[in-house]
Image (cartoon, rainbow, N blue to C red):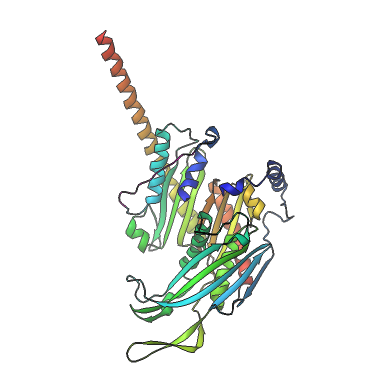
Amino acid sequence: MVKSAKILSEIEQNYIEKLVNKGTRIDERSLDSYRDITIKTNVIEKANGSADCTLGNTRVVVGVKLELGTPFPDMPDEGVVTVNAELAPIASPFFESGPPTEVGIELARVVDRGVRQSKAVDTKKLCILKGEKVWIAFVDIYALDHDGNLIDASALAAIAALLTAKMPKVEITKDKEIRLLEETTPLPVVDRPIAVTLAKLNGAIIVDPCLKEEFAMRGRITFTFTEEGNLCALQKGGNGTFLPSEISDAFDKARNIASQLRQFLPK
Amino acid sequence: MVIRESLEPAIFSIMFPRTAIDIYIEIVQADGGTRCVGIIAASLALADAGVPLKDLVAGCAAGKIDGTLVLDLNDTEDKCGEADLPLAFMPRTKEITLLQMDGSLSPEEFKDATNLAITGCEEIYEMQRETLKKKYAENRDEINSEKTTTKEGD
């Protein structure tokens, strides 16, 4: 973030701030409006599940890969879901190849928390042999184009990919060997969490910041809501601060938007 | 990273161009609330170092156990409870500098939990202030006693 802050000129910063004060944005949106969303699923043939999500010019592909593994000792009858993010240079001049950066780690953790805390995947149903064999679902996020708000785009793509993922049926032989069958069954997904990010820019709260607004903003806050409308994850980011009243306003806005965004997801 | 972001808004970094401030937090024993305690200690250490601050940053978590909202979770409560909401707050300006949540909270519970955590922060803030004041009072006493001894020496 420090590096990217250098990119925005003072004149542009002032311009963005002035627009926000007038109730509009550089891409002519209102403060509360989201960019156009498209979600395509099953875009990667070899993955167990996949989704391609665009949010304006931001584009993210998520792949779900299932592997057989051993469960954690404290949860012997539950499968595992892990989220990883790859911010490749193709997405933005600020991304470099190599070990994950703070931005990448935070992205993966925010998405992971949303999926995990909403209990979107019924991990008990990923268990094959208690204490020995479970399915491990790797949810891999690949940013293809970064024009701001990678978190929401990734969260949408992740849950869309999980919703359409298929897991092979298995057969357990007498000597406890596991055979994968050709037949598949849908991954047991029981909730559809939605992440909504808002940014604080010059004292105003804006929804779904684009890249330039992310440079200009002071703070950012991501709410993740379950289908029931309960909050399941929350993360404040950036160097800015929020007043308690702003948090509460942002919460109501985000909750509203979350239920609208859910329409874009496969059932 | 979240700790950095929770302290940075308090520091008048504009007074330190081309300067890095390194803060090292060492968790000696973890029993829940390490993030918040780290912030509390770090902001006191910054003040102790004489770094100009907008305010001390206080941190405290609120959570939910068995449907009841509680303040300051320990390790077991964090793992077995239904929600954990760490928050850092600058009471003078009423600004929230850190806010995270995982678990499940209804809108009402979320608002109550946030307020609860803020109350916790305010309590801790008073203790932070007292600690700082006490330190300077001790310094003053020390200096005064030194003065008297030198006078006696003359």
Q: Nearer the viewer, residue B40 or A43?
A: A43
Q: Quadrant of residue B131?
A: top left
| Stretch of the chain drawn in magenta | B20-29
Residue drawn at 56 percent across, 47 percent down: A2
Q: Position of residue A54 (x, y in %)?
A: 65, 66
Q: Position of residue A106 (x, y in %)?
A: 50, 57
Overall secondary structure of the magenta stretch?
loop
Q: Quadrant of residue A122?
A: bottom left
Residue that protrudes farthest toward the top in the picture: B154
- Total marks drawn? 0
Residue A104 vertical position relative to residue B22 in the rendered view, above or below? below
Residue A42 vertical position relative to residue A254 in the rendered view, above or below? below
A225 on left or right of A93: left
Residue A126 vertical position relative to residue B143 in the rendered view, above or below? below
B120 on left or right of A140: left
Q: Position of residue A47 (x, y in %)?
A: 54, 77
State yes or no: residue B130 in magenta.
no
